[in-house]
Image: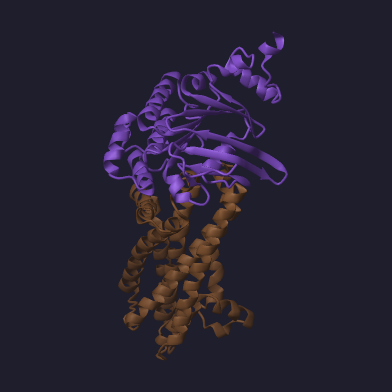
Chain colours: A purple, B brown
Amino acid sequence: MKLTHAATARPVLQVANVHKHYGSKIAVADISFEVAAGEIVGLLGPNGAGKTTTINMVLGVLEASRGQILIDGHDVMRQRRRALSATNFAAVYAPLPGNLTVEQNLRIFGLIYGVRPLQMRIDGLLQQFDLLAYRDTRCGVLSSGEQTRVCLAKALLNQPRLLLLDEPTASLDPATARDIRLQIQRIAREQGGGILWTSHNMTEVEDVCDRVLILSQGRVLLQGDPRTLASEHGAASLEDLFVRLARDPGATAPKREAGA
Amino acid sequence: MIRWPALYAIALRQLYLMRGSPTRVLPIFAWVAVDIVLWGFIARYLARVSDGVPDFTATLLGAVLLWDFFSRVMQGVTTAFLEDVWSRNFLNLFASPLSVGSYLGGLVLTSVLASLIGLAVMLALAGGVFGLSFAMLGLLLVPYLLVLFLFGIALGIFASAMVLRLGPASEWLVWPIPALLSPFAGVFYPLDTLPSWMQAIGRALPPSYVFEGLRSVVAGQGFSMPELIGGLVLALVQIALACWLFAAVFKGAIRSGLLARYSAESVA
């Protein structure tokens, strides 16, 4: 499938036949999916399923062996600057430098993303994520929850068309995680961008995502509405479906229909 | 393509780090000061025990000072690069619209500022304590410093590419590079002192043209314009090659997954 740039209501992310292998080891096998404007898509899968490989390819820090990725119509590899100007991300494994203060980090990344007017945007984000008290605090001494909020503030600096969130609530207590989820849902609603979200928390995924993709062994096994996908495939819950697929990637048949 | 706000951001990051941490500022002066004091007294002693030998202070101390300047320029680039290795910042930086050109430009700007401060301290210390003056060189000092500066930038970018390719553990290979090159560059002796294979390597190093020229001026024999231009051109070519190498390593790191894994390997 060759992607086109001309569609009027084009998706913010188009992943077409993307494949990545390291020697004979296949990390991602010809996956295709899209994220529409205003849509929150969950990317689920057991460890090693290819989620982070996929996200790294979307972020342009890993080149696909073949296939094409368009962000807001721009090819990540050929139009890198344009594509990545429309993107941002937050991930637990990519904290902001701990030896700089919250405001210094936001200023540096704001300059890199070409945000204007920068000071106003920084002040707004500090307020939005309840970080005003930590403006001059070094990121390295903040708690996990505070660091996550700083990463999210950085991820929203450029009001991205595509926001990638790799387990954004993994290190948060339930109350903070719920606050963050509500904020992200509001951002998707108000800014109209698309969000690709990875998580191992199925309750969170059902609560937040409009659609989920379940990956295993580098392939998209299933996709659909997280609130109905489990019942469509004869599982008691999304978590049960996830566990079943993690143990046996071939077990996608709807059990209820089989038993009827 | 270079975007100035992004380039400025990389330099600003280093300024913030220096402002918040005196331990980052100290090396700009400390080792230079130690070298000046050590070699200043050695030169003074040699001048006392060897009557009739021309000005040791100018030749020895001047050479040390200029070599330290080159080393500072190189380390200015590599230290700014290593800050991103130490803080596991590559994913944040390179999953953004930041281009390799803007990133390298930011590292170079950082080094320019730090090395100019270091140079001012060197000149003040060498002049104030040991009476070394570069007045005899006049405006010639500018192109000679420029050659050393450009070569320092080239080597700094080359060393950064090496660490990007070989991984964080290869950092220890960076620090001895100036010491490794100094015997070939003829810092303290004419190139013709060396065996021919070492001379051949020396001629590929722009600083050798600077030190040969300086010795000639100090000895009252004037300087060779073709040699000076040769050193300048060589340094410019080496900067272009170093930038090309960094870009190639960067591209390879994206293809192989090294860049995406770098953060994880930094803490391994």
Residue drawn 56% across the image and 34% down it: A33
Looking at the picture, tell me which residue is in the foreground, B192 or B16: B16
Name of the residue lying farthest toward the bottom? B221
Quarter of the picture holding the C terminus of chain A: top right
Q: Quadrant of residue B104?
A: bottom left
Q: Position of residue B88 (x, y in %)?
A: 50, 44
Q: Is residue A175 left or right of residue A260?
A: left
Looking at the picture, tell me which residue is in the foreground, B20 or A236: A236
Q: Position of residue B78 (x, y in %)?
A: 48, 58
Q: In this orientation, does residue B170 appear?
A: no
Q: Quadrant of residue B108?
A: bottom left
Q: Position of residue B131 (x, y in %)?
A: 32, 76
Instruction: Using the image, determine if residue B216 lies above or below residue B6.
Output: below
Residue drawn 43% across the image and 48% down it: A82
Instruction: Using the image, determine if residue B254 lies above or below residue A92.
Output: below
Q: In this orientation, does residue A237 appear?
A: yes
Q: Position of residue B105 (x, y in %)?
A: 41, 59
Instruction: Using the image, determine if residue B169 lies above or below residue A151.
Output: below
Looking at the picture, tell me which residue is in the foreground, B229 or B186: B229
Residue drawn 42% across the image and 33% down it: A147
Residue drawn 42% across the image and 91% down it: B221
